[in-house]
Amino acid sequence: MTPASRPRRPRPEWPLSPQLTDVAVAAAVALLTGLDAAVNDPGHQQADWLTWLLYAVSVAALLVRSRWPVAVTVVTGAGCAGWALHGHIGELLNLPVMVALYALAVQGGRRRTLRTAVIAGLVSGVVSVIAGKDVAQPQGAPLLEMLWPLVPLLLGEVVRGRRELLEEYADRAERAEADREREARRKVDQERVRIARELHDVIAHTVSAMTVQAGLALDALDSRPEVARAAMRQVRTSGKEAVRELRTTVGVLRQGQRAASAEPAPRLAQLDDLVEGVRGTGLRVSLHTSLPADTGGRELPQLVELAAYRIVQEALTNVIKHAGARHAAVSVAATEGTVTVEITDDGPTPDAVAGEGYGLIGMRERAAAVGGGLEAGPMAGGGWRVRAVIPVEEGAL
């Protein structure tokens, strides 16, 4: 499943819709504020038509606080200021505007919350000073009146920040999961290409040699039966080798199982056997190697030797299948920090190269996998040349 098609992780939701939530909140505020508005302290303005008008407007505004939080804050704030200026005081008369301030902070941003805090604090302080001219107020009451609007704003800011933090955590988790899936797919693709390259290099080489040997046996069956028998024996040997290599590869593909015969990867010391098998097809092959092991030096890294071996193997397979050559020359030389592999043949040079098959692509991939490069093309005097230069990391084993 791709990240685009994967459904997002379900998150806990409020059981009520925003509209029903507004109705429920407005009903609760109406009950509490109505009880406080109905009875006022002796010596202060008692509830009258203006008190209940401001009450009705404030409660009605809360019904749409989720859609228009700024407008609802202005309306409920005006209602709260109207109560104070009318002389009607109470502990819960500022509850509608506190609910509106909380909703504004939850649904808005930090900058809007700061602006609202400054404006609400100043307005509350001014209203407190004006209302205190007619009613005796304790010392410092205006300062306290400037602070209470900050309480619902701060609470709303905390709730909104926590919600954003949880959403960020959820998004990070989804991105991390998507990255893990992409990395897993990348590794699977790399492994698939590697297995395809191994199958092509091993099976294609062996089967190509078997095809040529079977042709030699068929041509010599009547006139030279001893040559036919030798060729068929070589076919049988090559067939067993192909089956063994195929069984090893299939064993690697089985999840949780190892290959039945985990033989070491081929190295450059086995090039003699490879070339001898190719000579059985009738192609004359000369081999020249200059390796550290030949002079008592340190062995090359296994990955470097495997890449060089497979490049030689695939290049000779292409000569057998496509070149129509009579002679091929293989040279593998290790110099300071590099291994140079060169395979040439004397086959006819094609007028144009129509495209690249999997063999040439595989050789380039093998060289690139160990940090090297490969060139292939016709030579000036005729024939074809494959040349790869593979770096050797200093100190690698």
Image (cartoon, grey):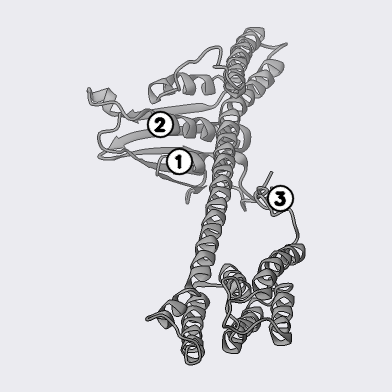
Separation of residues labelled 1 and 2 (CA atoms): 9 Å
- Against 149, residue 305 (above or below) is above
Name the residue that disc number 3 marks. 5
Place of residue 381 in the rendered image (x, y in percent of width and height, measured from the top left): 48, 48
Quadrant in the picture for residue 82: bottom right
Quadrant in the picture for residue 78: bottom right
Q: Secondary structure at mark 1?
A: helix
> Label 1 crowding class (10 Å Cα cut-off): few <14, some 14-19, many 20+?
some
Q: Secondary structure at mark 3?
A: loop
Q: Amino acid at mark 3?
A: Ser
Q: Amino acid at mark 2?
A: Leu
Is residue 328 in view?
no
Looking at the image, tell me whether mark 3 or mark 1 is earlier in sequence order: 3
- Against 333, residue 47 (above or below) is below
Quadrant in the picture for residue 53: bottom right
Looking at the image, tell me whether mark 2 or mark 3 is earlier in sequence order: 3
**Front in this rendered view, residue 337 or 340:** 337
Q: Secondary structure at mark 2?
A: helix
Residue drawn at (48%, 73%), measured in percent from left and top?
A: 148
Place of residue 143 in the rendered image (x, y in percent of width and height, measured from the top left): 40, 80
Tag 1 near tag 2, CB within 8 Å:
yes
Separation of residues labelled 2 and 3 (CA atoms): 39 Å
Please give the label number shown on residue 369.
1
Please give the label number shown on residue 156.
none
Is residue 303 in view?
yes
